[in-house]
Every structure is written in C-alpha cells, then in structure tokens.
Amino acid sequence: MDAPAVVRITITVSPHHVNRSFRIEAESPAYYRSSQVPLNGEAAARKHTIVYRGLPEGRYAIRAELWGIADLLAVARQQAVVRGADEPFLPDCDQGACAQDNPDAPR
C-alpha cells in the first residue's frame, strides 16, 4: 500500500433558515472518517471544504447529509478512488461535481 493521500471534499449548501449542520463521511472497507460542521441558517457560507489527510488508497463511499433542527433534509452520495502516489487521483463520481481544491477551507 502506498503513502496516505490528502483528499478534499467540497459541498455547496444553499443558505436557508432551517439548515443547522452537515455531516460528511468517507468510508472504505478498511477505513472510516467523518466530520460534522455547524451551519448558521441563512447566514451560513454557501461552499464548505473538508480536508481528510492520511486516507489510505482504496475505493470510498462519500456521503453528505444536511440536517435541520431535528430532521435530515438531504443526502448526496458519490464514489471516489484514492490511488497510490505513482497514479493520479481519479474521482469516480456518479453525480455532480467532484472535490475541489481549497487550501483555506476549514477542516
């Protein structure tokens, strides 16, 4: 297995007064990582980037959940492949745009 990778996942959430948080999960058969990010309703930023450092190579299921005060509002899913250092990162997206690079984004 090659060195771990740095993976950036960017999601876009339209600001709305009911939005309270989103959760991102990256899961492979051998690895799991998740992040929960609070949102401030209509005052929240539109774009958010999560940076996962140290992901081992493999095929990942990426899941994003948007939460309101007590309810799950939306779910998005994508597949991504993390390859070794001598191979390019090739996202395997089944819907929408894939991760974008934003080094200034929160982790």
Image (spheres, rainbow, N blue to C red):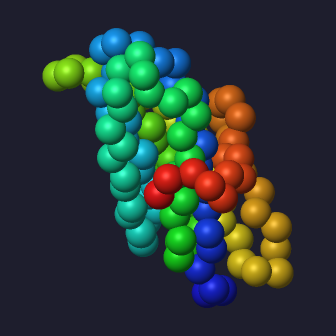
Residue 47 in the image, given as x and y percentages of width and height: 58, 34
On screen, residue 31 above or below 59: below
In this rendering, the count of numbered labels is 0
Say whether residue 60 is visible.
no
Which residue is drawn at the image coordinates 53% and 71% (left, top)? 53
Which residue is drawn at the image coordinates 82% and 67% (left, top)? 88
Instruction: Quadrant for the N terminus, please.
Output: bottom right
Residue 50 in the image, given as x and y percentages of width and height: 52, 52
Which residue, as the protein is rendered here, is positioned at the far top?
17
On screen, residue 63 above or below 59: above
Which residue, as the protein is rendered here, is positioned at the far front?
43
On screen, residue 57 above or below 92: below
Residue 107 in the image, given as x and y percentages of width and height: 47, 57
Residue 72 in the image, given as x and y percentages of width and height: 28, 23
The quarter holding residue 20 reads top left
The quarter holding residue 59 reads bottom right
Say whether residue 41 is visible.
yes
The quarter holding residue 71 reads top left
Q: Nearer the viewer, residue 41 or 1?
A: 41
Q: In the drawing, does residue 91 fall left or right of residue 59?
A: right
Which residue is drawn at the image coordinates 57% and 51% (left, top)? 105
Q: Nearer the viewer, residue 29 or 25?
A: 25
Q: In the drawing, does residue 102 fall left or right of residue 32?
A: right
